[in-house]
Image (tube, coloured by chain):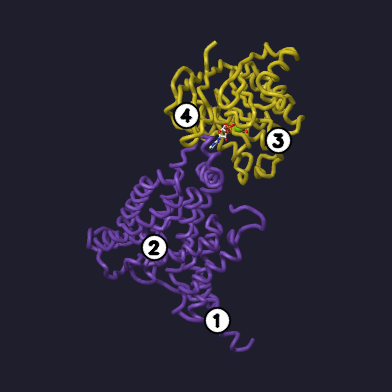
């Protein structure tokens, strides 16, 4: 093996590894967007800002800015807050959902702005630090540099995504969710309450969003726009997955994570956003029904 | 005989202008099968959907003597009013069994299991395909699944909207024989929408003829026993086009 090729491989594997780790986080964001879209045909543009607000709440509750609680209690309170916010947003838009998905979608933009405004109002425009209480260790494995953070992200992603897929595939609630996604009239005929299933999606999405935000913030810092920017990649992941496929968003997230990492390293760190847009456009053209769509099959 | 369903002065409007159902009144007794017969666009489906609470309507609907017009569709399902829609409306990407779970969504887990077995016994054609995706069933099997899904919820009143649509005559007969068997075994009342007079005659007690959203005539099954009377009713209410 020539030296050059060896070096490329030495770079490539770590890049792919860390890309996959971030990709899992994009997938957490994407899964929430897709769950909401599948059940109610609404694209939730408030997803990032609400999750960002929740991250700030955790910071506020645990740093002494608002309260001086332990990290765990702060996370619990923030989770309760996002669930309440999900309730509130859905309560306001639910009359719209059955009239026009487009109007409902546009009104989520409004809620995103409100969440961002509330964040600014309470916490200001400063950058803050929000760390995770995770084991700080690292090890080398087959040339990969693996940290406690990596393993934490991987474990959390596997458990949450695994649980979600189990619920959707094997429980009564999952049957209701799939029925509403595919044939809302059939679901109504069978006496299902469409609103409560929509709400289930909104709540699961909100929780996945906070988990994603919590895990992404330690890699950078927390500002008013950090989490919203992160959700942009989650959005791309959802688009690559076809926006209506849960497994598709997982694959899309990991793909985006890896490709963005490779692009940043080998091409340019400045143009990653442009690259992301090109990826989205390419995906829409090459896989209009998502990367996992069977030829001629339906989106599942 | 006690009345399961009593509809009076039922009207259905789509939007502000078009009136699909106009002042329709009829009743269904315990264990009775009532057929609504009429050409395309006569308002049959609209009446069924109004009774099921799937579209807004005016007029009075009593179920077991109680007014239900204000109840949402899901509350009517819980009370035992089950609509089996035209065009089947099964969930294509879910398995047969999952579709049945959907039908028995409000039941306790144990009841749901026993009813699933009962439905699969009733329709052996789909029993050996229970774990197959519903879209892989034939049209007739899908219709059986749709009816089976309706039976899952322990209905007291089944609203069957054109169960024979798109089925081969032999399959239609099989579906109707199954319905007749269910009827014999329970006091299930059925409102049946059919365009096929001969087939609905196999199980029904009463017929209402519909045109332009109104009931224009009424016969009991006994009235139509002989061929001459049947032909007379067809000529009077359905016109030559429906004679087949
Ligand atoms: N969603 C709707 N919006 C507007 N008009 C409708 C709608 N559904 C039905 N209609 C109209 O209401 C009238 C009655 O329709 P309905 O579906 O009840 O007829 P039907 O007797 O079931 O006909 P078919 O035998 O074709 O199923 C028709 O004129 C139809 O065009
Ligand atoms: Mg009809």
Question: The disc numbered 2 marks a residue on which chain?
Answer: A
Among the 4 quarters of the image, the one containing residue A114? bottom left
Local packing at callout 4 (Cα closer than 10 Å; few below 14, some 14-19, many 20+) is: many
Query: Disc 2 marks which residue?
Result: A213
Local packing at callout 3 (Cα closer than 10 Å; few below 14, some 14-19, many 20+) is: few
Query: Disc 1 marks which residue?
Result: A10
Query: Disc 3 marks which residue?
Result: B166
Ligand 2 positioned in quadrant: top right
Q: Is residue B134 above or below residue B18?
A: below
Residue B107's spot in the image, x, y percent? 51, 32
Question: B92 and A13: which one is in front?
Answer: B92
Question: The disc numbered 1 marks a residue on which chain?
Answer: A
**Chain depicted in purple:** A
Residue B217's spot in the image, x, y percent? 61, 17
Query: Disc 4 marks which residue?
Result: B57
Question: The disc numbered 3 marks a residue on which chain?
Answer: B
Question: A98 and A91: which one is in front?
Answer: A98
Between tags 1 and 3, which lies in front?
A: 3
Question: What's the distance in space between the residues labelled 2 and 4, CA to CA?
Answer: 47 Å
């Amino acid at each position: 093996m020539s030296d050059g090729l060896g070096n490329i491989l030495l770079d490539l594997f770590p890049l792919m590894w860390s890309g996959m780790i971030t990709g899992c986080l994009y997938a957490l964001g994407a899964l929430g967007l897709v769950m909401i879209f599948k059940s109610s045909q609404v694209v939730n543009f408030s997803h990032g800002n609400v999750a960002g607000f929740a991250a700030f709440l955790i910071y506020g509750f645990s740093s002494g800015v608002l309260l001086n609680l332990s990290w765990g209690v702060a996370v619990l309170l923030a989770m309760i807050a996002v669930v309440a916010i999900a309730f509130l947003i859905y309560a306001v838009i639910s009359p719209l959902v059955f009239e026009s998905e487009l109007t409902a979608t546009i009104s989520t933009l409004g809620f995103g702005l409100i969440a961002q405004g509330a964040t600014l109002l309470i916490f200001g425009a400063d950058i803050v630090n929000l760390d995770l209480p995770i084991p700080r260790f690292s090890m080398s494995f087959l040339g990969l540099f693996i940290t406690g953070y990596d393993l934490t992200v991987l474990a959390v992603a596997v458990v949450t995504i695994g649980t979600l897929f189990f619920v959707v595939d094997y429980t009564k609630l999952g049957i209701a969710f799939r029925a509403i996604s595919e044939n809302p009239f059939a679901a109504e005929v069978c006496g299902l309450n469409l609103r409560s299933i929509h709400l289930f999606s909104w709540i699961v999405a909100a929780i996945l969003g906070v988990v994603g935000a919590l895990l992404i913030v330690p890699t950078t810092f927390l500002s008013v726009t950090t989490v919203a920017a992160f959700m942009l990649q989650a959005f791309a992941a959802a688009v690559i997955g076809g926006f209506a496929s849960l497994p598709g968003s997982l694959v899309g997230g990991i793909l985006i994570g890896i490709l963005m990492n490779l692009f940043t390293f080998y091409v340019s760190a400045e143009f990653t956003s442009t690259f992301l847009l090109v990826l989205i456009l390419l995906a829409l053209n090459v896989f209009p029904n998502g990367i996992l769509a069977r030829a001629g099959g339906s989106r599942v | 005989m006690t009345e399961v369903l009593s509809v009076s002065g039922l009207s259905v409007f789509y939007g502000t202008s078009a009136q699909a159902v106009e002042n329709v009144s009829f009743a269904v007794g315990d264990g009775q099968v009532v057929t609504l017969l009429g050409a395309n666009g006569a308002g049959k489906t609209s009446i069924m959907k109004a009774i099921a609470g799937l579209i807004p309507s005016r007029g009075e609907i009593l179920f077991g003597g109680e007014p239900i017009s204000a109840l949402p569709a899901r509350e009517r399902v819980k009370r035992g009013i089950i609509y089996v829609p035209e065009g089947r409306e099964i969930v294509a990407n879910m398995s047969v069994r999952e579709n049945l779970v959907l039908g028995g969504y409000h039941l306790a887990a144990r009841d749901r299991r026993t009813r699933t077995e009962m439905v699969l016994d009733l329709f052996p054609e789909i029993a050996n395909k229970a774990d197959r995706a519903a879209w892989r069933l034939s049209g007739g099997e899908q219709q059986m699944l749709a009816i089976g899904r309706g039976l899952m919820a322990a209905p007291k009143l089944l609203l069957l909207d054109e169960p024979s649509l798109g089925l081969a005559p032999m399959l239609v007969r099989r579906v109707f024989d199954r319905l007749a068997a269910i009827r014999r075994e329970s006091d299930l009342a059925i409102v049946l929408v059919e365009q096929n007079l001969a087939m609905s005659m196999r199980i029904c007690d009463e017929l209402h003829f519909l045109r332009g959203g109104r009931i224009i005539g009424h016969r009991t099954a006994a009235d139509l026993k002989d061929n001459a009377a049947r032909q007379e009713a067809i000529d009077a209410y359905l016109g030559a086009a429906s004679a087949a």
